[in-house]
């Protein structure tokens, strides 16, 4: 049965769930906001200007006779990526040149604007748009997107297909991500060395807890932090149990044994003092960045795209941080899950849909596109050949490789493509809205006396989702 969310409820869920996906221009979200490695002009973006509504507009180098095309994104750092790749497209395809205008603005505004344009039969809609992961199902359910199967197929053997398949409905693929989004654990080695704990010895969550006790005893610092207005740590631990926030049909499904187990496990870590509530409620706040940069917490488990947060907001930790695999529940389990993301899609209202689809696949799946995403934005590439390219993996001048003590590509190569991805279908956005607004604040801070099973039963009942 096709899932639909009532428009007014959908808009509410979209506003509340912006933290699910890519960080907007204000970095209010929780995905792949990238890093301020370059300005758009430095990164190859052409004629950037401020639009009347305060948004940023970027254009690639104008080509006489090129097809006019519009793209909307809610991440300013994506502007340079798209305009530079448009120039590369035109060099390789002079007979199909495009003049691309990229518009960006505050994340909530841009996502709502895209949805309203789609609901108005495409009036004023762009050809291509970035859709953050938490809201993606809304656009699929509304039948606003074109299948990308034909343009993805040529790249199928070169990429991690999980990052395309998750933006689909089982039959068609509608979106392409910027990165793999593999979750890892970042350790502050100054703290770990003071505690005489080797992160390489940590395999399971029980190992992690025991290590955290030693770290707390010897340094007085917590091992980790949990968000109350986001979900990265709980979702990571749930995905490792093969548990999802929505069921196979996309229905909200947070009231599960696995979810309760995760909440109780994190509560126990908080009670032991080895886990704290993240200052500011999440790991994308000014308070948190200052706390992290001061070396006041030993580790954090986040996707690899979070490297850009370290390089941008934690200058004092350069050379002190090391990246290791995330802990798992049982030794031998797959030590990699996917989190966060942005599905870039072509709207069915585009007058140049075939060309838009070709360009999108080129930008997001080509070697040139993936190299830009890694070198400039710090995104772990979904094109697996780059994991073995020494020009990428051993580049001492790369700001991300030079910041950390360990090499993230070692983890990617070790774990391969056997990855667990979140199910973002159906009521995912409505579910996320409740998780962010009440569930985790209640679970970890406000209502800790209520057993997790009872809490989740109440929270499940508060999710408003129309599946008819």
Image (spheres, grey):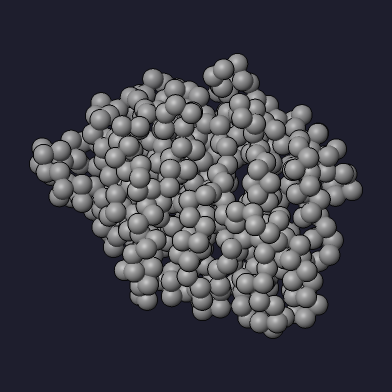
Above or below for 144 versus 72 = above
Q: Residue furthest front?
A: 332
Q: Work out whether residue 445 can be spotted.
A: no
Q: Residue 229 appears at what percent x and percent y?
A: 67, 49
Which quadrant of the rendered structure holds the N terminus? Answer: top right
Q: Residue 307 appears at what percent x and percent y?
A: 50, 64
Of residue 336 and residue 308, the one placed in the foreground of this image is: 336
* Residue depicted at 75% across the width and 79% down the height: 219
Q: Residue 254 appears at what percent x and percent y?
A: 72, 36
Above or below for 454 versus 390 = above
**Label tally:** 0
Which quadrant of the rendered structure holds the C terminus? Answer: top right
Above or below for 42 versus 23 = below
Q: Residue furthest right?
A: 449
* Residue depicted at 72% across the width and 60% down the height: 205
* Left or right of residue 451, residue 423 in this image: left
Of residue 303 and residue 33, the one placed in the foreground of this image is: 303
Of residue 301 and residue 277, the one placed in the foreground of this image is: 301
* Left or right of residue 13, residue 457 in this image: right
* Left or right of residue 103, residue 425 in this image: right
* Left or right of residue 311, residue 447 in this image: right
Q: Work out whether residue 406 can be spotted.
A: yes
Q: Residue 215 appears at what percent x and percent y?
A: 74, 75
Above or below for 134 versus 389 = above
* Residue depicted at 75% across the width and 49% down the height: 262
* Residue depicted at 28% across the width and 44% down the height: 362
Of residue 179 and residue 54, the one placed in the foreground of this image is: 179
């Amino acid at each position: 049965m096709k899932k639909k969310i009532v428009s007014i409820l959908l808009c509410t869920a979209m506003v509340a769930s912006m933290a699910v996906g890519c960080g907007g221009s204000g970095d209010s979200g929780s995905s792949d906001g990238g890093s301020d490695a370059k300005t758009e002009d430095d990164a190859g973006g052409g004629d950037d200007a401020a639009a009347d509504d305060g948004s940023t507009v970027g254009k690639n180098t104008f080509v006489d006779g090129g097809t006019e095309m519009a793209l909307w994104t809610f991440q300013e750092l994506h502007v340079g990526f798209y305009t530079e790749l448009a120039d590369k497209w035109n060099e390789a395809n002079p007979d199909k040149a495009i003049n691309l205008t990229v518009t960006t603005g505050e994340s909530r505004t841009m996502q709502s604007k895209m949805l309203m344009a789609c609901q108005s039969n495409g009036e004023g809609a762009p050809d291509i748009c970035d859709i953050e992961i938490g809201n993606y199902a809304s656009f699929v359910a509304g039948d606003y997107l074109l299948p990308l199967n034909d343009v993805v197929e040529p790249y199928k053997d070169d990429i991690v297909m999980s990052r395309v398949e998750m933006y689909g409905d089982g039959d068609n693929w509608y979106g392409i991500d910027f990165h793999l989004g593999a979750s890892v654990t970042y350790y502050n080695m100054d703290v770990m060395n003071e505690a005489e704990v080797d992160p390489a010895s940590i395999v399971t969550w029980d190992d992690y807890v025991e290590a955290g006790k030693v770290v707390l005893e010897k340094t007085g610092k917590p091992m980790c932090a949990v968000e109350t207005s986001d979900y990265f740590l709980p979702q990571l631990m749930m995905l490792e149990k093969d548990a999802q926030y929505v069921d196979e049909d996309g229905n909200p499904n947070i009231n599960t044994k696995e979810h309760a187990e995760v909440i109780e496990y994190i509560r126990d870590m908080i009670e032991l003092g080895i886990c704290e509530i993240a200052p500011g409620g999440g790991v994308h706040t000014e308070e948190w960045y200052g706390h992290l940069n001061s070396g006041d917490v030993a580790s954090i488990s986040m996707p690899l795209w979070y490297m850009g947060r370290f390089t941008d907001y934690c200058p004092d930790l350069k050379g002190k941080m090391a990246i290791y695999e995330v802990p798992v529940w049982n030794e031998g389990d797959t030590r990699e899950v996917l989190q966060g993301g942005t599905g870039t899609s072509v709207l069915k209202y585009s007058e140049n849909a075939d060309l838009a689809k070709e360009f999108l696949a080129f930008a997001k799946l080509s070697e040139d596109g993936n190299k830009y995403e890694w070198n400039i934005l710090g995104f772990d590439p979904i094109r697996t050949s780059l994991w073995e390219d020494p020009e990428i993996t051993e580049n001492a001048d790369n700001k991300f490789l030079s910041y950390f003590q360990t090499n993230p590509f070692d983890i990617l190569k070790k774990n391969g493509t056997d990855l667990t991805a979140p199910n973002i279908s159906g009521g995912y956005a409505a579910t996320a809205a409740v998780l962010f607004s009440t569930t985790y604040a209640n679970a970890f801070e406000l209502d800790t006396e209520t057993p997790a099973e009872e809490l989740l039963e109440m929270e499940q009942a508060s999710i408003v989702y129309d599946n008819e």
